[in-house]
Amino acid sequence: MTEQLFSSDTVFSVTSLTSLIKEMLESSLANITLEGEISGYRPNSSGHLYFTLKDENSQISAVMFRGKAAFLKFAPKDGLKVRCTGTISVYAPRGNYQIIISKMEMAGEGNILQILEERKMRLAAEGLFSQDRKKKIPLFPKKIGVVTSPTGAALRDILQITKRRNPAVEVIVFPAVVQGADAAPSIVRQIQAANDFNLVETLIVGRGGGSVEDLLPFSEECVVRAVAESRIPVISAVGHEIDWALCDYAADYRAPTPSAAAEVAVPQLADIKNDLSGFQKEMLSLITAKVEKMKLMIKSFNPESLEMRFRTIEQPFLMRLENAKTALQDNIGDRCRDVRQFLREAVHILEGASPKTILARGYSMVKTGNGKIVRSQKDVKTGEKLEIFPAEGKILATAD
């Protein structure tokens, strides 16, 4: 086919060749249907949608212009599997081919998001994302650690912001691979190293933005568990604000970007100084007010006023003592009178019951010869000798 369009000695310019390729592709691959998974989704402020369609082995750039995107019945996102209808075209300024989509519908969830969702639910059921596990981020750390790529933009942003906010805070970098098959084990090793040697007070774990595939290491189960088990408080800072990873849920704090993580981890030195200055002024003001109050109180004291104050304090106590003394004396007098009256009544009762008193009334006591008191006629036999005891003396008699 190409031999019919040009001869072997034809010399093309880059523009003419690109135009020829564009014409051939657009004429032969118009209105095709393509199925794949969305990756690197980038909606434009003008309303155009830019992303990549991919499967296990290949990928192609895709664009859906605002007029067609307005009729979508779902919100596109990374990892979503879609079926698109459109035309293959060439973007001449870059020489890239792409599909211009006129129609797009969902073809089911992408494998990656489905796997991550299942993993998220399983780890959440174990309690790895529980709020009870979260540790507070230290307010005034002296050292913070960063587990990330030593050459990435994320580290540069963190170092720059830390230096600007508080140069006194030391940053220790735990270099890790953050993309690819070796990334997850590398991240886990560095988190464990930071904990084993207890080198820092706060640990930032993250990287800059990327596609879902680029951020996958931070959703690996081993990384999530390492973050959850870290004794050092962890700030997760993976990608941009719209990006997410499972370690975000396990971390003690999730920052939308690495720069935001640095702002959370490192307090603003100027704010600290302003707060301390404010506290100092408030403390000095309170102390000064207390001292002035004490000076006024001391100034009012002199020997005469001190004696008067003492008398004023002493007088109520003296009055209470005198009243207590009087009350005690009155109570003792009343008690003594009650006891004397009781004793008089007891003596009167005892005297009334005394044999002598009874005999003085004219009664006599009769005894037999053997000294037994006679209480009844039956106690006496005829002719028995009796002794009669009136109030005074004794009378001898014989029973008749």
Image: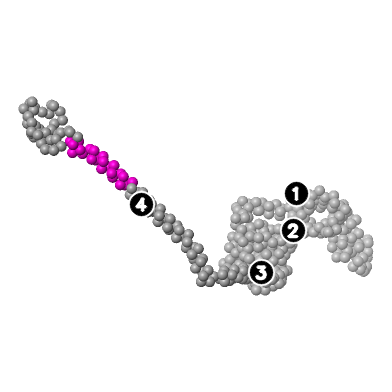
Residue 354 forms part of the magenta stretch: yes
Using the numbered discs, state the Cα–Cα distance from disc 1 to disc 2 in whole angstroms. 21 Å
Residue sitting at 83 percent across and 59 percent down?
45
In front: 313, or 145?
A: 313
Res 90 visible:
yes
Q: Is residue 107 left or right of residue 86?
A: left
Mark before the other along the chain sequence, 4 or 1 = 1
The amino acid at mark 1 is Gly
Q: Is residue 329 left or right of residue 277?
A: left
Mark before the other along the chain sequence, 4 or 3 = 3
In front: 311, or 214?
A: 311
Residue sitting at 59 percent across and 62 percent down?
230
| Residue ID for mark 1 | 108
Above or below: residue 118 compared with residue 370: below
Mark before the other along the chain sequence, 1 or 2 = 1
| Residue ID for mark 3 | 278
Q: Return the mark for residue 379.
A: none
| Residue ID for mark 4 | 332
- Quarter that holds the N terminus: bottom right
| Residue ID for mark 2 | 242
Using the numbered discs, state the Cα–Cα distance from disc 4 to disc 2 in whole angstroms. 92 Å
Q: Please, what is the dominant secondary structure of the magenta stretch?
A: helix
* CB within 8 Å, label 1 to label 3: no
- The nearer-to-camera label among 2 and 3 is 3
Please, what secondary structure does the residue beneath circle 3 have?
helix
| Chain part drawn in magenta | 338-360
Above or below: residue 121 compared with residue 188: above
The amino acid at mark 3 is Gly
* CB within 8 Å, label 2 to label 3: no
